[in-house]
Image (cartoon, rainbow, N blue to C red):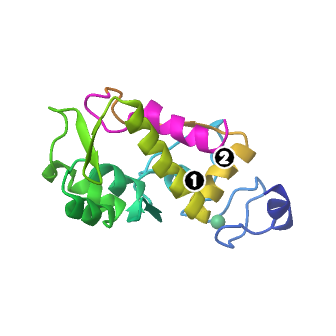
């Protein structure tokens, strides 16, 4: 990865725009836009690589033979026991699935979710493994997501997520779980 960056030192390896003398991309929408801090606070409302690692960004991947448009749509799909509806939710864009989440079944009373018709306890190892396996497929199948995540490791950034709910009885993915999966993928 470093050799690619070195050979493209004048131009952004992602979008081809020129780089600033700091090495950051001039294009404000580019994934290669790196923050000046030691950490990257992942948020869809952010810019550059901090946005690129958001679950809401669309990176197609296939998981258990289900086509997913984004990690967000996969996670929102876990609310329903209906296999057909689940596949439909997975095929939605990340932002659309996020916006319709309150119309989907509420898992909070039962603390149970579903994948391919199988009931899973939100607080089980099985659930944690399911989420990690989905992230692994995203990482393996999306070159741009993998590039963005690997770049954070190559550049020595720590990952943080300062928004979101920490109560696991109220959220399907807490900030600590989210960052934990990403750190696991990038070998930190
Ligand atoms: Zn760029």
- Place of residue 148 in the rendered image (x, y in percent of width and height, measured from the top left): 62, 55
Closer to us: 119 or 31: 119
- Secondary structure under tag 1 reads helix
Distance from mark 1 CB to nearest ligand 1 atom below 8 Å: no
The quadrant where residue 184 appears: top right
On residue 57, the disc is none
The quadrant where residue 173 appears: top left
Q: Tell me which numbered mark, 2 or 1, is placed earlier along the sequence.
A: 1
Q: Locate the C terminus and report the quarter of the image it occupies.
A: top right
Q: In percent of the image, x 32 and y 67: which residue is there?
A: 91
**Ligand 1 lies in quarter:** bottom right
| Classed neighbour count for the residue bearing mark 2: other residues with Cα under 10 Å, few (<14), some (14–19), many (≥20) | some
- Place of residue 147 in the rendered image (x, y in percent of width and height, measured from the top left): 65, 58
Q: What stretch is highlighted in magenta?
A: 168-188
Q: Badge 2 is on which residue? A: 152
Are dots 2 and 1 in contact, CB under 8 Å? yes
Camera-nearest label, 2 or 1: 2
Does 2 sit left or right of 71 as displayed? right
- Secondary structure under tag 2 reads helix
| Classed neighbour count for the residue bearing mark 1: other residues with Cα under 10 Å, few (<14), some (14–19), many (≥20) | many
Q: In percent of the image, x 23 and y 47: which residue is there?
A: 79
The quadrant where residue 23 appears: bottom right
Closer to us: 153 or 106: 106
Q: Badge 1 is on which residue? A: 49
Q: Is residue 30 visible?
A: no
- Place of residue 65 in the rendered image (x, y in percent of width and height, measured from the top left): 41, 64
Does 23 sit left or right of 29 as displayed? right
Q: In percent of the image, x 18 and y 56: which residue is there?
A: 82
């Amino acid at each position: 990865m470093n050799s690619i960056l070195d050979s493209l030192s004048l131009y952004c390896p992602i979008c081809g725009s020129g780089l600033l003398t700091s090495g950051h991309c001039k294009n404000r929408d580019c994934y290669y836009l790196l923050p000046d801090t030691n950490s990257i606070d992942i948020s869809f409302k952010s810019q550059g690589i901090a946005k690129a690692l958001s679950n809401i960004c669309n990176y197609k991947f296939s998981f258990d033979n289900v086509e997913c448009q984004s990690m967000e749509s996969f996670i929102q799909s876990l609310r329903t026991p209906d296999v057909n509806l689940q596949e439909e939710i997975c095929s939605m864009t990340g932002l659309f699935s996020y916006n319709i989440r309150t119309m989907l079944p509420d898992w909070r009373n039962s603390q149970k979710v579903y994948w391919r018709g199988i009931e899973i306890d939100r607080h089980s190892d099985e659930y944690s493994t399911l989420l990690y396996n989905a992230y692994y497929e995203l990482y393996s199948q999306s070159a741009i997501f993998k590039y963005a995540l690997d770049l954070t490791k190559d550049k020595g950034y720590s990952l943080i997520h300062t928004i979101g709910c920490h109560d696991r009885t109220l959220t399907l993915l807490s900030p600590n779980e989210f960052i934990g999966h990403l750190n696991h993928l990038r070998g930190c």
